[in-house]
Each structure stands twice: as structure tokens, then as C-alpha cells.
Amino acid sequence: DHLSTASVRVRTLGFTILGHTGALGAEAIQRALRDDAPEVPAAALRFFSQVTPLAQPETMRRAVSSPALPARIEALRLLNGAPPDARSCGYLLSAARGTSASSSETVEPPVRLLGAQGLDRPCPRLETQRTALREIVESLGRDPDRWQTPSYALLSLARVFPGDAAARLSGHVAHENPFVRANAARAATVLGNRDILRSLAADPSPNVRTAAVDGLFALEGHRIDEVLIAQLDRDDPQLLLTASRLLAGTARTDATAAALLDAFERISDAGRETWRDPRLALLERLGEVGDASLEDRLVPWLSDYDARVAQAVADLLRTWTGRVFTPTPHPLPRRRIPTPSELNAMDGASVVLHMRSGGSVRIALDPWLAPTNVHRFWTLARDGYFDGLTFHRWVPNFVLQGGSPGANEYQGDGPYTRDELGRASHWRGTVGISTRGRDTGDGQIFVNLVDNVRLDHNYTIVGTVVEGMDVVDRALEGAVIERAEVVPGR
């Protein structure tokens, strides 16, 4: 069967291997573009650079008008990095405006977003570009679940037409969606608007604060150290990481050391193993700005619940004092393993994610492949943990990641789960557990948008999307999981 799963995977891998050997050209890629399976043309297009310059225009024309969404996404990714000539700008404008290259096809949100992002350099038809970006930016608010294209269009407008962006920035700064406000902070950075950035550095959302202080530091450097120190009163892991990183080289050593140690003690008392990254970052910066006068406050943490943190404390104390300190960690209790009855209950069960923008995604669980990670995913979904959370990260033709209460990489459920790496491959539609190093699963999941076999043996797989992959394909950063439902098996 030409469209059987095995057949499609063989063709996808075949084009990928040929591409890595430099054996793909226009004829082979154009043949892939005629394939009925959406994964195949996208795989071949990754090697577009192997097409001769003479054949590139026709190959790109076929790619942007392909009926396969992954192929059009890949084409627009290529155009985002191409010189902004009349042809490439025409394709990007068409995509951003929602005008399909093929009248029979609907322009999906990912296509529109990539088109708007690609218009961040001057095009030959400047007035047409300006008009299009203005209209897209001003469309913010018409659909609360489709803010992404107007929000990213503001960034493109700021880079090419700063005056037009400045006149439209306030509506994005005041928007109720923190993803929009974070992009407004990035646009304000491009525009050099320090007042707006200082305002957003006090935003209720830690993610907005993170974007704002990153921008402020890019504009003012250590003149904003007071603002950075103030962020250390917050408990968001990503914000603490960012503030710690930016305070490197500060002249305000005493105030910084005090704030860093206060933050370290505060979040350490919470006993969350999954906050390892910000705790290590706080200790690293404390080692730069502190001294042996803080020894008594750090010694108790030699018995920390995280062996890596306890070792970092011992190393820091030795650096300060010249004496040897021995860490004596007291690990937290591990998550219990699923019982036989729970394994049987998960066998054949599914988790259905009902999306606020419409549609649902059914994930068939595989408890025999990854029993402890599936058990946590199943339990969290059953207990309502995912309700109202988002997919906070979208990488076109790679992954859609979400399930973080903080809508960022660093906040999840605790404690860590260990990797369960079997022989299963990260084919399109498989659902994996996001990690930040070995054995650091925190409940966040990702869906493979294409065949990502390079992730094999590095990330745990808990299931496969068996219904609603079209919903996944249309989802973008900020897509809201309205409700997660566990559907029993046999």
C-alpha cells in the first residue's frame, strides 16, 4: 500500500538519506513534491540547497503551492532565510495575507505566521509590504485564539517600518494574552522603547518580565541591575535563570549576593527537584558576587535533596574558604511505580486533549513502552493538571511542546522521572517527554510534527496521536488545552 505507514516512512527516510549524501536535486525533490504523503515532500525540501540555481524557482513554486501542509511550511522556512527579492517576498506576502497559491487550498495558521515572520526585511515593493503588515498587526483581537500572526507581524513591522510599529505598539502592550505582551516587549526592544520595557519588567506574567529584562539589558546593560535584582523576588524558574545570567559582571555585588541567596533559600525550601536549573544558576552567580561571610547560610545545603546542588554548594564553599566540604545529599522520595492494575487500566487507554480553538487530539498510550512516564501523564491528565495549560513552544516541522504551568521550558510537575528509552522511533505523531538532560522529565510533552528519528534513544515516548493530527498541524505557540480527558481502553 503506497500510503501505508511503513511505506511512507521508508520513502521519508530514503529522501533524507539521499539528502545527507548530497544526492538530491531538482528532479528528485520535485518527484517528492508529487508524493501523496505529507511527510515525504517536507523531508526532501530540507535539502533544497542541492537544487541548481536555475531549477530553484520552479521547485519553490511547486513547494509553496503543494497540497501538503508540511511542504508549504518547509518552503516558507526556506524563504525566511532567502534574499528578499520580488519572488520570495511575493510568496511571503501571499502567505501572510492568507491568500493561497492554490485556490483550492485553505491557508492554515502556521503558513500565515511564517509569512508574517518572513517579512522582517525590506522587500522591493515596500508600500505593499507596509500596507500588508499594518493590516495584519491591526487585526489583533478579532480572534482571541489567533493572535500569533498579528503579534509576530508587529516584530516584522518594527524591523522594517519602526514608525508604523511604534504607533501600533500600545494595543499589544495592553493585550490580555501574556504571549502577545512578551512579543510587544521584543518589539519595544527593536524600537528602543525603554519606558515600555521598564513597565513590562513589572508585568504580572514572568514570561513577559523575562522578555522585558532581556530587552532592557540589550539596550542599557548593567544600568538596569536594580531591575534585575528585583526579579529575584519572584519564583518563576525561567525568570530567575534570566536574571542570574544577566547579573554576570555586576558592580552591585553586595545587593546581588543578598538577593541571590534569599532566592536560593526560598525556592530550595519548596523542595522541587525540577527547579534544579535555576538553583544551580543562582549558586553560580553567587559564587561570583558573594564571599565566605555567607558560609553559615550555605552549609545546611550540603545536605540538599539534589546531589548536583549539594555538590555545587560544596564546590562554592571550597572556592570561598579553601577548605574541603563533603556533600551529604538526602534525596526526595521517588515517584511510585504503577501497580499492575494501573498498568492494565492504561493498556489501550487514551488521553484526549480538547483544544480551545476547536478540535481534539487523541493520544493512544503505550504503558508497556514507558510505564512510569505514561503513568504520570495518565495521572496528570485524569487529575485535571493539563486543563487550561498551553502548548508554549512551536518549532515548524519539528515539535509542538506544552504542558507547563508557567508556559515555559523550566516549569513543570515534580519530581523528575527517569528516561525510559526503548526501540520505538520518534515518527510523526509520536508523543515524547521533554527533558533538559538525562532523567529530567517534568510532565511536559511534545508531539513530533515530522519524522524526528534523530531524537531516538534520547527522549521517552509515551504514546501516539491516533486522531486529530490535523489539529496538531494547525496549532501554534500559545494553543490552549481547554481540557484533558482520559478515555479507558478495553
Image (cartoon, grey):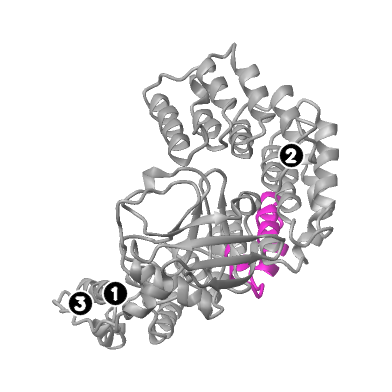
Residue linked to disc 2? 160
Q: Quadrant of residue 81?
A: top right
Residue 384 picture location, percent across and down: 56, 78
Q: Are marks 1 and 3 in contact (CB under 8 Å)?
A: no
Residue 131 picture location, percent across and down: 86, 39
Where are the magenta residues, as a range?
A: 182-210
Q: Closer to us: mark 1 or mark 3?
A: 1
The amino acid beneath tag 3 is: Thr
Drawn side of residue 179 relative to residue 226, left or right:
right
Residue linked to disc 3? 321
Residue linked to disc 1? 309
Residue 213 picture location, percent across and down: 58, 63
| Residue at screen point 69% across, 27% down | 88
Is 187 magenta? The answer is yes
- The single residue placed furthest to the top in the displayed view is 54
- For residue 89, say whether it is visible: yes
Q: Secondary structure at mark 2?
A: helix
Instruction: Tell me which numbered mark, 2 or 1, is placed earlier along the sequence.
Output: 2
The amino acid beneath tag 1 is: Val
